[in-house]
Amino acid sequence: MLSISAEQGWARIAHVNGVRTVTLRGDVDTAIANSAKLIEQFKREFLPPFLERYPELQVTFEGQEKNAKTTQKSIVGGILVGLIGVFILLSFQFRNYREPLIVMTIIPFALIGVVGGHLLMHMPFTLPSLLGFVSLAGIVVNDSIILVLFIKKKLAEGADVFTAATQASRARFRAVLLTSITTIAGMLPLLFETSLQAQIIQPLAISIAFGLMATTVLVLFVVPGIYVVLDDFGINFTQAGTEEGNADNI
């Protein structure tokens, strides 16, 4: 519970840029709550009636709250730059703009594992958790690439989209599993480390490990399914796959 009490102290008049100010500082017992929850509760329960009572006052948040918002904006910008970079690289690989989008559709599904992992490990979603999800953008596409390359190969051999898509998951199951499980195994020592230093970056490891667990299963159904759905909408992949196969044979 958030409790506020008034006590007497040393009188001091402080000004910032000519404006009379009062600064409130406090320490947080992380065993009970974190600063984000306290500030959220403060904004929800205490601040609205307080500003209604004193409408002439202005309230700003500094310190960890301000730094967290600045970092979040920077991370969002980094996500956009990273996604654009991944899309450009995949466009050079596949020589078109449709299949890079198919490969990258698995990225949002990683949130299922990220959120589920934090709930399972009883860990709050923090800034390192968000950094871990950003790192996943460049990792989870590996499994999609394996399936897309197999589907393109089958299309080049003359198979229809449905046949190529249905065979992709079965034929590349082992490769997809090994690609993900090696990364997950590398994160296990950090996940079960109990030292204070490790607990700081454990949310990052949770995001990567559990995000990969979710996408490893989902990619086997999502990517082939997208191929079949797009083929039902009249998007022709067979011709593109045949042309690439002929180019490789030359």
Image (tube, helix red, strand yellow):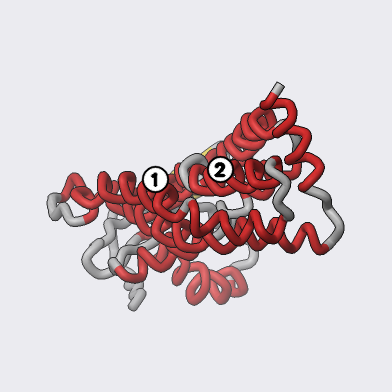
Q: Mark 2 points at which residue?
A: 145
Extreme residue in the right direction: 234
Q: Where is residue 121 in the image (x, y as percent from the top left)?
A: 28, 66
Q: How crowded is mark 1: few (under 14 residues within 10 Å), some or many (20 or more)?
A: some
Identify residue type, mark 2: Ile
Above or below, 71 against 159 in this view is above
Residue at the spot 63% in from the left edge and 48% down from the top edge: 151
Numbered disc 2: secondary structure: helix
Q: Where is residue 55 in the image (x, y as percent from the top left)?
A: 64, 66
Q: Position of residue 11 (x, y in %)?
A: 34, 53
Q: Mark 1 points at which residue?
A: 179
- In this orientation, which residue lies closer to the viewer: 212 or 142? 142
In the drawing, what numbered circle is on residue 151?
none
Residue at the spot 67% in from the left edge and 50% down from the top edge: 102
Extreme residue in the left direction: 195
Identify residue type, mark 1: Thr
Q: Going by the image, does 194 lie left or right of 105?
A: left
Q: Earlier in the sequence, mark 2 or mark 1?
A: 2
Q: In which quarter of the image is residue 206?
A: bottom left
Q: Position of residue 6 (x, y in %)?
A: 33, 70
User: Dots 2 and 1: beta carbons under 8 Å?
Assistant: no
Residue at the spot 47% in from the left edge and 67% down from the top edge: 40
Residue at the spot 79% in from the left edge and 58% down from the top edge: 231
- In this orientation, which residue lies closer to the viewer: 39 or 178? 178
